[in-house]
Amino acid sequence: MKQTVQGRWPAERAWAWQRAQGRKLGCNYIPAYAVNQLEMWQADTFDADAINRELGWARAFGLNSVRVYLHDLLWEQDAAGFIARIHRFLEIAQAHGISVMLVFFDDCWQDHPRTGRQPEPVPGKHNSGWAMSPGSAVTRDPRQWPRLEAYVRGIVREFGNDERVILWDVYNEVSNRFMGAMHAPWWRRVPGNAWVYATQVLREGHAERLMIEAFRWVREENPLQPVTAAEYFNFPRLNAVLVEHSDVVSFHNYDDAMALAAHIDRLQVHGRPLVCSEWMSRPKSVFATHLPVFRQHDVSCYCWGLVTGKTNTRFGWQSLPGADSEPEPWFHDVLRDDGSAYDPAEQVLVRAEGLNR
């Protein structure tokens, strides 16, 4: 039975937000200098000049929005400084005509995050240093959640009435252990490209409960922006929870154009605006085939990656560490480190959308 979530926006308010914002064509952004969220934001590595240069390139490419990951340890380390750096980031984005979606938590890639100096990227390995937030130890321990609550509430209190932020994404790929477990001993591949992993991890439920709490923390601060968390895999029960809590329905899709269109069709039954907050995985998921689908259905979309850099996301999810040659085609990212387009035809297509005018 479908639940009624307290504080969830009526559909009419979500559609009013959609009309006011217009369709977004953006990217998931982390600067080329950063191996993860911590290196992006920490005081000794935050580089406003690099961010300004790269967001200028994003604008020139034709993008008008970015999705950006925060991290709970940044709040614990230096809340006031973190807020100041977010303000600086938003100033830069606004100067380039770029709106921002902010992400609080993330269950992908490397566990046991730590502040301070971050690891150097492993050559050829996709997201070798990307840091979970808060990490499995904290996720499984509700006694530590009060500091997470302070983080979420503190950020929303500061930016909940800031029109430069357009959407709160409370939790990226909740309970996803695909990525961090890619090379674990119990990991195996089965026919049909279905991924199988430890049943106890799938069913632990702690991350889902933390996500629901995070929705509540955001809503109780009464921000002007909607709140969401994306479905990313065929988990019917979890996906129902994600949709029931989201003001705007978001999703991830790295499949071909036919599968993308079918995914959108399934989600349209909820009667709310749709945002594809992650897509693009060459050669299956590309601008030429997918932009017409997003345009037809009036769906905002954020490809993965802007400038190729320390995250190594031009290499695929299953790339082998130690690769010393450039992949062809690139898996993610749209710009080389000098700001030129990896594929100039992609830039032509994005500019033709006309969403950055």
Image (cartoon, rainbow, N blue to C red):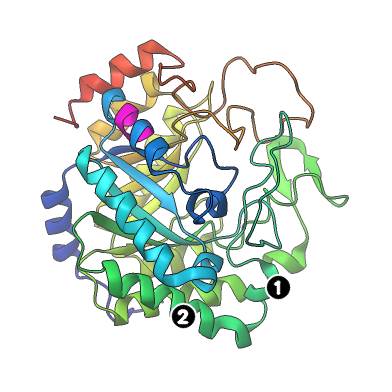
Q: Could you tell me which residue is drawn at 66 percent across and 53 percent down? A: 117
Q: Which mark is residue 137?
A: 1
Q: Which residue appears at 71% of the width and 28% of the height?
A: 124
Extreme residue in the right direction = 185
Where residue 339 sits, quadrant-wise, is top left
Above/below status of 53 relative to 113: above
- Horizontal side of 302 relative to 138 (left or right) equals left
Asked if residue 268 can be seen in this view, the reply is: no
> Residue 86: x and y, percent?
36, 57
Inspect the image, locate mark 1, and give the three-letter code of the amino acid beneath it. Ala
Q: Mark 2 or mark 1: which comes first in sequence?
A: 1
Q: Which quarter shows the N terminus?
A: bottom left
Q: Secondary structure at mark 1?
A: helix
Does 332 sit left or right of 196 as displayed? left
Q: Say which of 15 and 133 sits in front.
A: 133
Residue 123 within the segment the image draws in magenta: no
Q: Main secondary structure of the magenta part?
A: helix
Which residue is at 70% across, 51% downward?
180
Percent from the top left, x then y, of residue 76?
53, 73
Tag 2's secondary structure?
A: helix
Q: Indicate left or right for 170 with 193 as reference.
A: left
User: Looking at the figure, which quarter contains the C terminus?
Assistant: top left
Residue 271 vs residue 102, the one in the foreground: 102
State how many labels appear: 2
Give residue 250's position: percent from left, percent from top.
37, 53
In the image, residue 165 lies at what x, y percent? 26, 56
Q: Amino acid at mark 2?
A: Glu
In the image, the segment drawn in magenta is 54-58
Residue 39 in sight here: yes
The label on residue 149 is 2
